Amino acid sequence: MKNRTRRGIAVLASAVLVAGVTATAAPAFASVSQSVPAAAASARLTNLAHLDFLLDTATPAALPDHTTYKLDTAPAITMPWTYADARDGGTFARVGGGPLDPATGHWGQGSYNVDDIARAAVVYLRDWKQTGSAASKQKAYELLRSVAYFQTTTGPNAGNVVLWMQPDGTLNPSPVPVELPNPSDSGDSYWLARSIWAFGEGYAAFQKQDPAFASFLQQRLQLGVTALNRESLSKYGKWNIADGTRVPAWLIVDGADASAEAVLGLSAYSAAVPRDTQARTALSELSEGIAAMSSGATQSWPYGAILPWAQSRSMWHAWSSQMPAALAEASTVLKKKSLLAPAVTDSVSFTTTLLTSGGPDNAWYPTPIDTTQIAYGVDSRLQSLLAVADVGRLPGLRQVAAVAASWYFGANKSGEPVYNPATGVTFDGVQADGTVNHNSGAESTIHGLLSMLALDAHPDVKAAAQATTHITTTDGIRVVEAESAAPTTGTVVTPASAWTGESQYSGGAYLALTAGQSATIALGATDQSVARLVEPVVFQPEVVRGSGTAATSRWSIWPNAAGPATLGSLRHAVGAQGITEVPGALLPQSLRRPVPAGATSVTVVGTAGTVNLDALIVRPVVSRLVLTGAAGATTELVHSAATTRTRTVVGTAGTRSVVRSYDSHGKLVQTKSVARATSITLQAGGFAVLTGATR
């Protein structure tokens, strides 16, 4: 996904799955790959064949502000094509981004982009380190040379990076559709962050193998850090306001997500060169900003997640969500244990909630708006779980990582494998309706391979992920639209645009309730006899220093045999708008009491102002995901959202299993062998994983 701007991501998030499909035919300079026979695949999951196929070369000119290592003696540079469209017979055609101009051979965006080049370099670097492959070492070298060419070396934008290049080697700093920033090297960006990621891991790998090249990479990383210091990090220590909440002002493009990918490179580099104080300071400052985006609380939305964007309190997305991984790595390099704590909370509380609710969705804004799932999102969660597990010595998170990784092998909405180890192809994702996009562009290929490299490095996780590849039960958060209320005296409102600028109305509409108006909303059936937490999602107006008017509402269970059971009253208001797109915020709020088991609906009464109710997030106190596989293999993940210990039943008759229970910090509490459905105690905010097989 080429992350230019978050405005309109509600539309763009799905576009990654169809980009390039509009090309009516492969251009004359594109080639076609053939599937590698299954017999040729190695025992390892990692297969670089498809990424190798995506690679091509161009011969750009040496420009005053764009050049690279030994360009005078090696004028061709190597890069992956951005997209690969599926063709008949399991083949693919390489295509660029945007419309193709047949007269020039240029694309609206380009054929190559530095986002993918940088991350492809990381793939080959990690494969070389893991296997000693000379071919991967050479490809990593070539790709790092290419990343460096995109970096602007002189002038006011020195250190920043152009995003796109045409097939003939011409840089395209102002593509169509437009990127932000525009021109693409006029400010800090995701692509600057990813370049630093590649330079940092590249330096660490080549430091002793090729000192001259490593020195060049060091210079380019330092140039990138200089750009950060000129732009985002010049605001270090300053704070902005986002709808009444204090947020760090020094994150790259206001993003904990973009900053995290820079931190991955800075951590690798700083571990190798601890005396580079400028890079180490940048690492420390960015990590501090990422940690400050932790939501903290685990019983209410967003359930302990580290939020990705300072300009929205209502947004989380799976793609580019390596914030926990970055904090885990930085905590080790900087020797700051405090950085690990928010990463653990994100992994233990939020990721278990995410997995039991259907998996790594593209967009929660704040309800699951775009339930498309792509490898970038899955890999970001997997890398984070493994990094936090390794650094925090939390083996329970390795079990959760195996659950996340099983997505590649069929445990997804399609029920089909998304990665093929015989070909190295990772499909471009699973759509919300469960269909698979069988294209396989650079980003999906790269992150699929990063996941496979991680699994190959963790054989126990790899084996568990491949053992259970079918989803049999999912019982996590559900969304009930407020406009489905019956009866109601309120008014259904359909805004001109569901996108607010920083969030999105679920279902494209909301229910407006003025004082005295009411609505009864059915919660739907539950798979468990457990209480449920209900979080009304309300557009809350800005109320600052007496200006603006807060709305209020009262919630209860009605009808009820013993009379109305009060769930609580809510005040709907947020603080000053600050840096967000619009005043006010669309946010879930927590009711004081859970809805008891057996209750099927709730009633809300507006008590002051106008309550603009979008939806209800309904969350079981104990959420659950059950996966099955060949030979009767079973994995069951259960997570508690309760504030006290709670009982739940795991396992089934005829299945011999081991259940391991963990607390809210991911520490092992109990290991128990079971041979039937068995009641266990879950710690407050903790989780348990059952693994077993039918006897």
Image: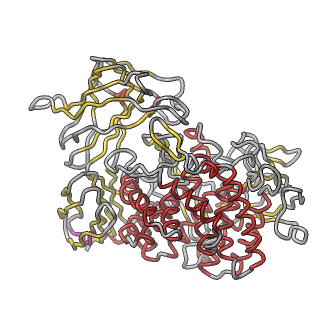
From where the camera sits, is residue 93 visible? Answer: no
- The quarter holding residue 614 reads top left
- The residue depicted at 24 percent of the width and 64 percent of the height is 651
Q: Is residue 333 left or right of residue 529?
A: right
Please tell me which residue lies in front, 15 or 251: 251
Res 613 seen here: yes
Question: What residue range appears in magenta?
Answer: 654-660
Magenta stretch, main secondary structure class: strand
Q: Quadrant of residue 398?
A: bottom left
Give the number of marks: 0
Image location of residue 1, percent across then percent down: 62, 50
Compared with residue 129, is residue 426 higher up or lower down, i.e. above or below?
Answer: above
Residue at (47% x, 23% y) in the render: 494
**In x, y percent, where is residue 223?**
74, 60
Nearest the eye: 357 or 335:
335
Q: Position of residue 341 (x, y in %)?
A: 40, 61
Q: Using residue 36 as the reference point, say whether residue 329 is left or right of it.
A: left
Was residue 658 drawn as part of the magenta stretch in this picture? yes
Q: Locate residue 561 relative to residue 665 in the image: left or right.
A: left
